[in-house]
Amino acid sequence: MFYELSRLAVGNLARARARLVMTAGGVLVGTTAVILLIALTIGLQQAAEAGIGNNASLTEITVYPSWSAGPTDENVPQLDIAAVRAFWQVPGVAAVIPMVYYQGGGELIADDYRNYAQIIGIDPSLLPYLGVGVQQGELRLGPGEVIFGGMVGDYFYDPEATEWQPINVDLYNTPIELRTYSYSGTDDMTNDLNVSGVLNVGTSNYDGAMLMPIEDVIALNEWSSGQEFDLETFKFDQIVVRATSRETTNEVSEAIRDMGYGTGGMGDFLNQLNSFFGTMRLMLGGVGGVALLVAAFGVANTMTMAILERTKEIGLMKAIGATDRDVLTVFLIEAGLVGLCGGLAGVGLSLFLQNVINQAILNAPAGGEGGIMFLPFDPAQIGGNLIVIPPELSLFALALATCVGLGAGLFPSLRAARLPPVIALKSE
Amino acid sequence: MALQKVNSAEITPMVSGRNLQKMFQLGDQWVQALRGVDVDIPEGQFVCIMGPSGSGKSTLLYMLGGLDRPTAGEILIGGQRIDSMDGEDLARFRRDRIGFVFQAFHLVPTMTALENVGLPGVFSAMPRDLRDRRAMRLLNMLGMLDRMDHRPSQLSGGQQQRVAIARALFNNPPIIMADEPTGALDSKTGQIVMQMLRWLATKRGKTVLVVTHDPGVASYADRMLNLKDGHIIEDTLPNPEKRNHVL
């Protein structure tokens, strides 16, 4: 039955081709607008994600004490050993990495050159969870050993020079000394450093840092401040939590926030980014939706006209045995097909424009003068994929266009279905 | 011509109307189109319904055919009450029991003759090849097979009405109802159409109801109902021997 009625509807459409083309044309424009605008946000989002970099940073959560209460408030959860133990219990956590910073002054000495580095103490067994790799040596921290951040060696200077000029020092192959000063400034000591490795550049927060075993840094702090270390009251300077996967990062982050801490990190940033692009997608999709809405009025108008024109035909169909539902079905199929045709053409046009635009962007001179100024990235970096149309988007747009046709045709079709046959037959 | 009161209820009538009334609202006035009509039509009878315009003759026809509902009264077709049927049942009833023929033919202008004849089959979900075969047989019966691929605009009025009759016969209904079937035709083609309807009654046992105001048409009928102001004022057998007249 449905098949027979569909054939009838297709036949009806095929007979008014010019009108079909024009009405579907409106849907085509609307569908294309929706697809391209959403595809643009997808392209921009992928570009932004590509800019964030490696996966390691996406599973990293930096925990800090909540800032909603004053720092002296005793009820505010602190980054103490209890916190570390609690974080380990959170599902989806791969590692909890507490860190201690050296609080006094420290100077690196390589022959005649000097530099400063932030000294960070870390549990050597947790090094693999730090999400870092080495460019020289090994990722290993034995007692008394240190690992340098990737950019520490680039910024040594000559204290005798009249003009500051960065000097490059090969930290791995040059004897380095560390001179530390006590808190009061009355005491200092100098130690030879045993360098086990140098980290890669740019993949971590440790480019300008020097990693040491956490016990060594605690010892340095005790010497520098003259105060005894007490694990139960000690507050870590930073706790980094590593989630097992990118997907669980958000949940872990949320669980930690529920415990009263603040969290940060690329994962959180990514979530913000995603929600930003989600909003952007809704807004731009809405703009395209307006075009589709205009098209819907076109479909509604066409269907209303068609039904006025074919009132006698409707009466005739009823006289020879069509039920109200048959008439409704025929006209709804017609309206849905107008939407579907427009949608198909829209998907086709969008895919074509996707190629044209992406090619144009790839071939345009990147950045700088004459480049594409509005792009916050080099198009070549993402293979020119500014417009990204995933198959789901095409399917969604097709379904949307069909629904627009059906929705716009519903009211006129209902009117047609409810026409009393006698009145329809006698209409002029 | 002897006028004779007809006792048409000897056997169970094919078409039966009881105290049929119909009210219309015309502007802010109520018009009574039918004021209590009683009628019984036996199977195979060729009935001509006549009367001046506004007499209610078309209203009566459409009501008996299930296209319109009475304001009051009962309609039985083949012993089945149709005035209380819901819309869907009524549509199925029309599809299976009644073949309509109209003055303006009401062919779908964008379909060929063959497609027009087969259109009722669409609403009974008949497969296309079966539909086409049956439509061809009917067109052949009415001498229109060579025009089956023509659209209505390529056919003369008489040919269009023959296509419309073929369509009315598509589901092999026991009743044919025609509203001014010759009204848009010249007298010669009008006669051909009437002969066809006469033939359907005589040879195929169809019950035929024709609304007309052409007295010439009435000469084909077994029986004539004359309506005026919503009443049957005359019920006669103008030509009883026509019952067996074959064209």
Image (tube, coloured by chain):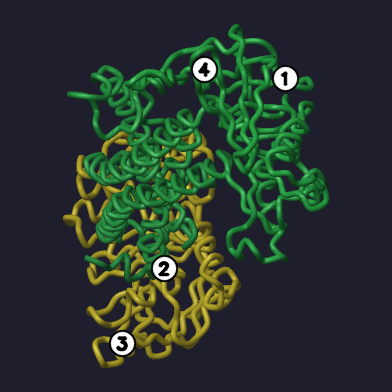
| Residue receiving disc 3 | B25
From what the image shows, is residue B61 above or below residue A34?
Answer: below
Q: Are marks 3 and 2 on the same chain?
A: no
| Residue receiving disc 4 | A153
Q: Residue at x 32, y 24 (%)?
A: A358
Q: Is residue A351 left or right of residue B122?
A: left
| Residue receiving disc 2 | A418
**Residue B165 visible from this viewpoint:** no
- Please tell me whether mark 3 sits on a helix, a strand or a loop: strand
Q: Mark 3 or mark 2: which is in front?
A: 2
From what the image shows, is residue B51 above or below residue A421?
Answer: below
How far is the residue under mark 3 from the one under mark 2?
19 Å
From what the image shows, is residue B110 above or below residue A75?
Answer: above
Chain letter of disc 4 in the image: A
How far is the residue under mark 4 from the one under mark 2?
84 Å
Q: Residues within 10 Å of mark 1 (few under 14, many from 20)?
A: some
Q: Mark 3 or mark 4: which is in front?
A: 4
Q: Are marks 3 and 4 on the same chain?
A: no
Q: Residue at x 31, y 53 (%)?
A: A290
- Please tell me whether mark 1 sits on a helix, a strand or a loop: strand
Chain letter of disc 3 in the image: B
Residue A125 position, x and y percent, is 79, 27
Q: Residues within 10 Å of mark 3 (few under 14, many from 20)?
A: few
Q: Residue at x 33, y 33 (%)?
A: A376
Q: Which chain is yellow?
A: B
